Amino acid sequence: MFASYRRILALPGALAFTLAGLPARLSMSMSGVSAVVLIAERRGSYALAGAVSAAGLVALAVVLPLLGRLVDRYGQARVAVPAVLVGAVPMAGLLFCVRSGAPDWTLFLCWAACSTAPNVGGMVRARWAHLLRGDEAGRHLANSLEQALDELCFMLGPVLAVLLCRALTPEAGLLTSAVLCATGVLLLAAQRGTEPPPAPATGAPGAGRTGGTGRPAGGRGSLRVLLPMFLATGVVFGSMEVTTIAYTDATGHGSLAGLLLGLVAAGSCVSGLVFGLLRPRRGPVARLLGEVAAMAGLMLLPAAAGLSGAGPALLAAALFLAGSGTAPTMVSGMTLVQQLVPAGRLNEAMAAAVSAILVGLSAGSALGGAVAQRLPDGTGYLVPAAAAAAALLIAATGARRLRAAAPSAAGDAHAADLPVPAAAGHAD
């Protein structure tokens, strides 16, 4: 089953940069939970902890695309290493302010300033796109692997964070997260042989239309479709999490909330791996539409289970199946970003996609919480179902624009097989 994954990981440098990025991606899944537990324990207020966490998400959503643009222009190592080192200063400030009883506004300031951590998942995907340029099937397989690894990290990260904070000290989760982030970024930056070449702005006529690469920029219009779709998918994630916690608490099974959420991630992880093994037989836009439709259909299962008052066993099965619908959507969405956006804007575009998901997560958490608070138990599961339907509507109405951009992407794939000019300053 995994022979195909072994094949792409055997490519020069692939296993090294894949493993190097894992600590930083695990860190990202730990940091938010660690900050919430720390502030709640030391300040005795979950409201304050949630507000600080939300402010950090907003700051991260703003900063990630800006960092992505710098990465595209100057290269991964030259941007990511200073960014993660700079972020260590406000992290230390947050730990000090929490312990010393500093005013609440200092917590917001410090946590927002910690948002300089680069989008490591996007940088790893950019390496895959560069390594597998011209190989659509290979990119599909690599993106499936990356999505499965993302789900694995987001399944293990919160559990590890809570365990460290409870077993050692409330600061342990955040400290471990910071160390993992720095370690992962430094290890990834050290893999210079697989780093995509930077695409500095040349100031030449038309550079603004090509992202400084001389390649046609067909991706801007497509991003106007993909980013709202990613935002709606983020609402699915955020509302599912809050609704599951609220529903299990209301039905007397609060201790199972973590396990049930883990099943959502497990379903996504398994489906991502299996999806990667399926050979693409349709165009990328048709695949995306089919996968978003499947996600929308599967999201009806938890809604049916919740509204019917189903027990934890039936809800667990529904959540696992619902989770299995998200990974294919994310894989095809990120693959389209790679195909439709010029190489000189790839990190920025993928960071913008992550930012859209983060905004959706925050909005979904707030909306799911409000519905769970005011309406009967289980009604909150209608929120992820509605958000998935909205993602399908966005993808369907924008399909023509995506297909119109696809021809230039196909041309880019052929152009990518040409040797990289010496002026790029990079040799594989």
Image: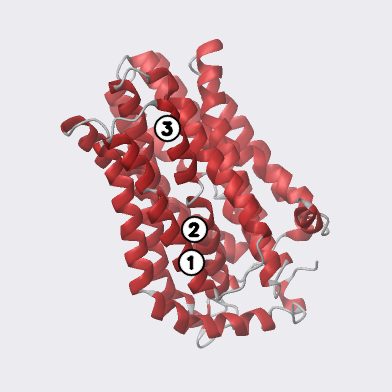
Q: Compared to 49, does 20 lie above or below?
A: below
Query: What residue type is disc 3 on?
Result: Leu
Q: Looking at the image, which residue is at 48% across and 16% down?
A: 170
Residue 135: horizontal and vertical position, in percent?
Answer: 71, 72
Tag 2 and tag 1, C-beta contact below 8 Å: yes
* Residue 29 location (% of width, % of height): 52, 36
Amino acid at dot 1: Leu
| Side of 89 where 355 appears, left or right | left
Q: Position of residue 42 (x, y in %)?
A: 38, 14
Q: Residue at position x 46%, y 42% from top?
A: 115
Give the percent coordinates (x, y) of residue 102. 34, 19
From the image, tell me which residue sits under label 1: 288
Instruction: Return the residue at label 3.
Output: 314
Could you classify mark 1 by the number of other residues whose Cα lies within 10 Å: few (under 14), some (14-19), or many (20 or more)?
many
Give the Cα separation between the discs numbered 3 and 1: 29 Å
Q: Earlier in the sequence, mark 2 or mark 1?
A: 1
Q: Is residue 93 visible?
A: no
Vertically, is 23 above or below 124?
A: above
How busy is the neighbourhood of tag 3: few (under 14 within 10 Å), some, or many (20 plus)?
A: some
Residue density around tag 2, few if under 14, some if 14–19, many if 20 or more, within 10 Å: many
Q: Is residue 155 left or right of residue 99?
A: right
Residue 329's label in the rendered image is 2
From mark 2 to mark 1, how far is it between C-alphas?
A: 6 Å
**Which tag, 3 or 1, sits closer to the chain's start?**
1
Quick check: 263 above or below 198?
above
Placement of the C terminus among the 4 image quadrants: bottom right
